[in-house]
Image: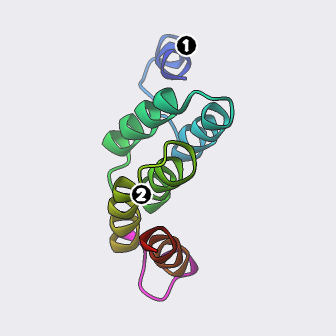
């Protein structure tokens, strides 16, 4: 995915940031295909490009909760996602619920 977006610079003459959705979807596919460490690497890279993305931090929480069984890290990422979500948003409620579930 990094190579693809880098190659666009050669075609169009300027750099493209990898869209958050492309990172998230690619990480989901990787995680579902037993490539969790690569998925985590990709999402962490995505948080450098999109540091205010609650979605990416939420995805890190999900990967750590469901795929690598690290509830303490899942909680941290869900907390970060909650902080980045707008107050009274459905996303904020989702991350709060997920954080509470992993805390049990």
Q: Is mark 2 on a helix, strand or loop?
A: helix
Point out which mark residue 11 bears: 1
**Within the magenta stretch, is there residue 85?**
yes
Q: Is residue 98 above or below residue 46?
A: below
Pick whichever, 90 or 73, lies toward us: 73
Q: Are marks 1 and 2 in contact (CB under 8 Å)?
A: no
**Within the magenta stretch, is there residue 7?**
no
On the image, the x and y values in percent for residue 57 come to 42, 55
Crowdedness of circle 1 by 10 Å Cα count: few (<14), some, many (20+)? few
Looking at the picture, the colour scheme in use is: rainbow
Point out which mark residue 71 bears: 2
Q: Is residue 45 left or right of residue 11?
A: left
Crowdedness of circle 2 by 10 Å Cα count: few (<14), some, many (20+)? many
The residue furthest front is: 104
Q: Is residue 100 above or below residue 24?
A: below
Q: What stretch is highlighted in magenta?
A: 84-92
Residue positioned 33% across, 73% down in the render? 83
């Amino acid at each position: 995915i990094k190579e693809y977006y880098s190659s666009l610079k050669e075609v169009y003459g300027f750099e493209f940031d990898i869209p958050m959705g492309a990172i998230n979807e690619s990480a989901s596919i990787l995680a579902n295909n037993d490539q969790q460490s690569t998925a985590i690497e990709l999402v962490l890279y995505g948080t450098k490009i999109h540091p205010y993305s609650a979605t990416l931090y939420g995805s890190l929480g999900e990967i750590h909760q469901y795929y690598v069984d690290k509830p303490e890290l899942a909680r941290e990422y869900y907390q970060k996602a909650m902080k980045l979500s707008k107050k009274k948003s459905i996303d904020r409620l989702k991350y709060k619920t997920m954080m509470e579930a992993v805390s049990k």
